[in-house]
Amino acid sequence: EGFLATIHDTTSDVPSIHDQPIVSEFPDVFPDELQGIPPVREVEFNIELIPGSEPISKALYRMAPIGLKELKDQLQELLERGFIRPSVSPWGAPVLFVKKKDGSMRLCIDYRELNKITISYHQLRVREQDIDKTAFRTDYGHYEFLVMPFGLTKAPAVFIDLMNQIFHEFLDKFVIVFIDD
């Protein structure tokens, strides 16, 4: 049995995970960015539809030129990291941006229509036969996710299930599974 304790001044700036000594000791366990597509795990993200559902493809949302530049940059990063691939799926959800607290832009795929016919974060692969359902349309092409995207109705529950499986023996000892956006 072991314990980890740290002391920090709470009157100064908000603490960062990088302030924790263990994070510095094991940078391979705490990377700033995930590298590539995750390994195959026991839990896969599947999208089960209401029987008889047909593919849904919605028109693109209009975007200002500055948004189009941001879109192009973010799509390129997702492609380079192996999180998305070009798609020819009959499915297609439109995209938009939401401004984050720090002023940066979060790419959001509007999966509301898919969520309506679904029987109810990039660290879990999408099941092969469900990849085409994650397709989204942009001014720069049609793509589909290979990893669980933000915005789908079951994503948080599936991710929590995975974390509970991984950390089962440590739950309530020194691990609490919690998702905060």
Image: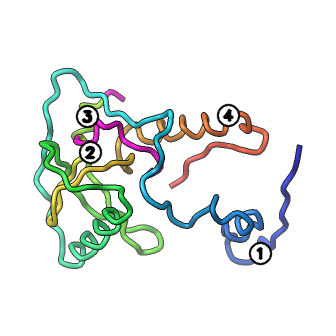
Q: Nearer the viewer, mark 1 or mark 3?
A: 3
Element at label 2? helix
Q: Decide: marks 4, 1 in contact (CB < 8 A)?
A: no
* Real-space Cα separation, disc 3 to disc 2, in angstroms: 14 Å
Q: Secondary structure at mark 4?
A: helix
The Cα–Cα distance between marks 2 and 1, rounded to whole angstroms, is 44 Å
Q: Which residues are magenta?
A: 119-132
In the image: residue 173, left or right of residue 86: right
Q: Amino acid at mark 2?
A: Thr
Q: Which of the marked residues, 4 or 2, is nearer the chain's N terminus?
A: 2
- Label located before the other in sequence (2 or 1): 1
Q: Which residue is mark 1?
A: 11
In the depicted view, which residue is nearer to us: 37 or 166? 37
Viewed as shown, does residue 120 lie left or right of 63?
right
**Disc 2 target residue:** 134
Q: Is residue 50 magenta?
A: no
Report x, y in % for residue 141.
15, 61
Mark 4 vs mark 1: which is more N-terminal? 1
Q: Quadrant of residue 66?
A: bottom left
Q: CA distance from mark 1 to mark 3?
A: 46 Å
Q: Quadrant of residue 175?
A: top right
Residue 125 in the magenta stretch? The answer is yes
Circle number at residue 173? none
**Quadrant hosting residue 164:** top right
Name the residue that disc number 4 marks: 168
